[in-house]
Amino acid sequence: ARAEAVAAVRDRYPALTAPTVDTGPSPAGAVEGWEQMPRAGRPAAAELWHLTNDITLYVLPAPGGRWQPALQTPSTDGIELLPLQPTQQDARDQAELAGRRVARMAMIADPVTSDRSLAAFADDGLYNRTDLARLISRRLTDADTARIVDADPADLVELLGAAGFSPATTVAVLAADGVDAATAATLLPAAGIPIPDGIRVLHERWDLPNTLAAELLDATATEMRTAGCTATEIMAVRPRDVLRTLPDDPHLWELAAGSMATAGHPTTSIVDHLVAHAPTPDAFTTGLLTIVEPDEALTIAASRRAHPDQLAAVSEAAGLSPADTATALATKVNDHIVLDVINIRCDGDTESVAATATGAGIDSSTVQSWLHPPAPGNVTPIRSAIDIDSAALLDRLPPAGATSADDPIRSLDALMLNIDSAGLEPAQ
């Protein structure tokens, strides 16, 4: 069927199958790429390439089987010959490299295209400090241009900024220059990169995880969110920032604790954050039971110094009675904390608290001291020492010395009297 279709097309449109006439290369050169240059007096193997409207590249056979690359630009006087190359392809590469350098310098000299052109130079794999200095020399003083080749990364950022290049182009140069990620992180703010953009830059240019990039930049949770980090990434780096602003909705604390666990925080660290930041006992308990088993919850909470109301809420959620709670806590926390917890579980019934505590092995004298705390001692006022009037204060000072040795003002006066005023006159 295909053969029949082709035959039908040939019969109906014979012009489409007419033989192609090879007209040879165009005298003006190819639009893109190398082509032969058949011109009188030129070898048949000579080639040219109109790289741009103003730059033409040449490759010519040379004696000894070598090849001569050359280029012609508006700034050259005739054709500029480049070093001989052993092969035709080497000569092509050398001519193209030289031509693109000239084209890039022209584009960088143009304010409209300069920034984009320098960024392209940094990304093309041929970047080096010598070419960088040559390309941006028109925008710097001779002294600053001379600094570029050996400049440290911080000075390089300063020079690029002085030359008027954008932060994005500066980043491209730093990456091409081989600056390590940690050093780049310290330089991004100086280059004018906001922290959220800096996280993305370190991730895309230096292949860093968002979490490590945020740590290097000391980013806040808000900045990480602006950079597009996930909730798990934010909780991995800045859990405190999030927890401090989290409302008391238990479901949110469940998500927060789970995100911290997924991010790799150890259980003890998560519990410490919950103890410090959970706004209500319910929020604390919900977050805790997200990461530990109920039968371990009370022991773990007590070991991380949870507050009495938090311990009471955990023991109730774990299904422990007040007596079981007292027994579980008796050897793990201070007796007074145990009594505070039992008091919450017993709804303030002091008789039940005393009975439960005694049953858990807490000494009755401790229970009584908790039930009847001692009155605060008398406070000794200190105002009498503060309210001394100025006259009394002066009376307490030692008497003034009789000689000038103890008085710097008198010493200065005596020194001035001994200076010969004539010696202060200008020399004649």
Image (spheres, grey):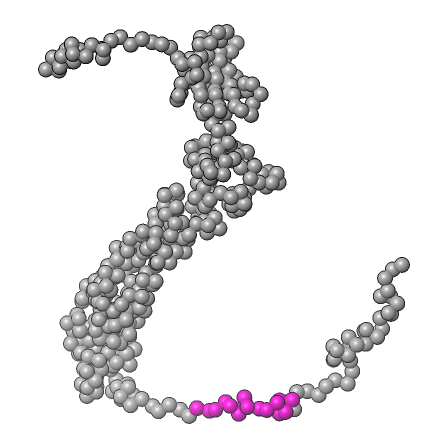
| Quadrant of the image containing the C terminus | bottom right
Task: Identify which residue is drawn at 78% across, 82% down.
Answer: 403
Asked if the stretch drawn in magenta spans residue 346, the answer is no
Q: Is residue 279 above or below residue 80?
A: below
Q: Position of residue 220 (x, y in %)?
A: 37, 58
Which residue is more in the foreground, 82 or 274? 82
Task: Identify which residue is drawn at 34% across, 52% down.
Answer: 227
Total residue callouts: 0
Q: Is residue 181 above or below residue 62?
A: below
Q: Position of residue 112 (x, y in %)?
A: 47, 38
- Residue 80 found in image quarter: top right
Which residue is more in the foreground, 273 or 339? 273
Q: In the figure, is residue 37 to the left or right of 346?
A: right
Task: Identify which residue is drawn at 74% across, 84% down.
Answer: 401
Q: Is residue 243 above or below residue 15?
A: below
Which residue is more in the foreground, 362 or 342? 342
Q: In the figure, is residue 64 to the left or right of 395?
A: left
Q: In the figure, is residue 101 to the left or right of 413?
A: left
Which residue is more in the foreground, 14 or 96? 14
Camera sees residue 320: yes
The residue stretch that appears in magenta: 379-394
Asked if the stretch drawn in magenta spans residue 383, the answer is yes
| Quadrant of the image containing the N terminus | top left
Q: Position of residue 289 (x, y in %)?
A: 20, 65
